Amino acid sequence: MKRLVYLFCTITLATIIAYAQPKEESIGLGASTGWAEGANLTYVIGQDVHLGFQLGAYIDGKFAPTIAPQVRYFLSHNGNFHPFVIGSVLISDRAQLKDGTQRLYFGSKMDLIAGAGASYFPAKDVHIYAQLSAIELPLNGNSELAFGLLKPAVGIEWFIW
């Protein structure tokens, strides 16, 4: 009997993991650190496209209210590992200017960030992700243009609907 129960649990868990991806038109809640530390809300438009919005409190280790709308495009859906590209507009309350001074009004730092990453789905409605920015393009001149493997970010999201 124990073997039958173990077999049933194993098959159930394998089935859940095999279908590990959120439903279309679902909403996810999560938290991340890296680009801007804070909470995020994600809306799944389709299997390949997720729209997100991040609300953060810190950037570069300093207190700075931050918002960042973002979009992820998933490149493949093989198994539990899903690579993606991401684009985001980071709007922050704090900017470190080139002369070392800081500006403290809303929208003082606005950057367009593009990068890539991957999600791992340990369960159907939960994913853990890691991403790197590849380009940071200043939109208001209060930061510098940057290319390369830049700021890493990690996070977790739970799709509740």
Image: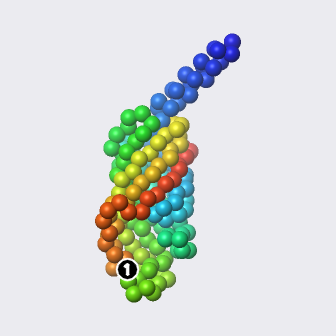
33 shown above or below 144? above
Instruction: Give how far across and how far down residue 25 sits, in percent.
Output: 45, 44
| Residue that extends furthest to the top in the rendered view of this protein | 1
In this rendering, does residue 79 appear at all? yes
Instruction: Give how far across and how far down residue 122 sits, in percent.
Output: 52, 38
134 shown above or below 159? below
Query: What residue sits 52% from the left and 57% below the top?
Result: 32
Badge 1: residue crowd in 10 Å (few <14, some 14–19, many ≥20): some
17 shown above or below 36? above
Q: In this view, does 134 lie to the left or right of 122?
A: left
Query: What residue sits 53% from the left and 49% below the top?
Result: 157
Mark 1 residue type: Asn
Q: In which quarter of the image is residue 11?
A: top right
In this rendering, does residue 51 appear at all? no
Residue under label 1? 142
Query: What residue sits 49% from the left and 40% below the top?
Result: 121
Query: What residue sits 52% from the left and 30% below the top?
Result: 16
Q: In this view, does 100 lie to the left or right of 76?
A: right
Instruction: Give how far across and how far down residue 155 sits, in percent.
Output: 51, 53
| Residue that extends furthest to the right in the rendered view of this protein | 1
Q: In which quarter of the image is residue 74?
A: top left
Q: In the structure shown, which secondary structural element does the residue marked by tag 1 occupy?
A: loop
Display colour scheme: rainbow
81 shown above or below 103? above
Q: Is residue 122 left or right of residue 78?
A: right
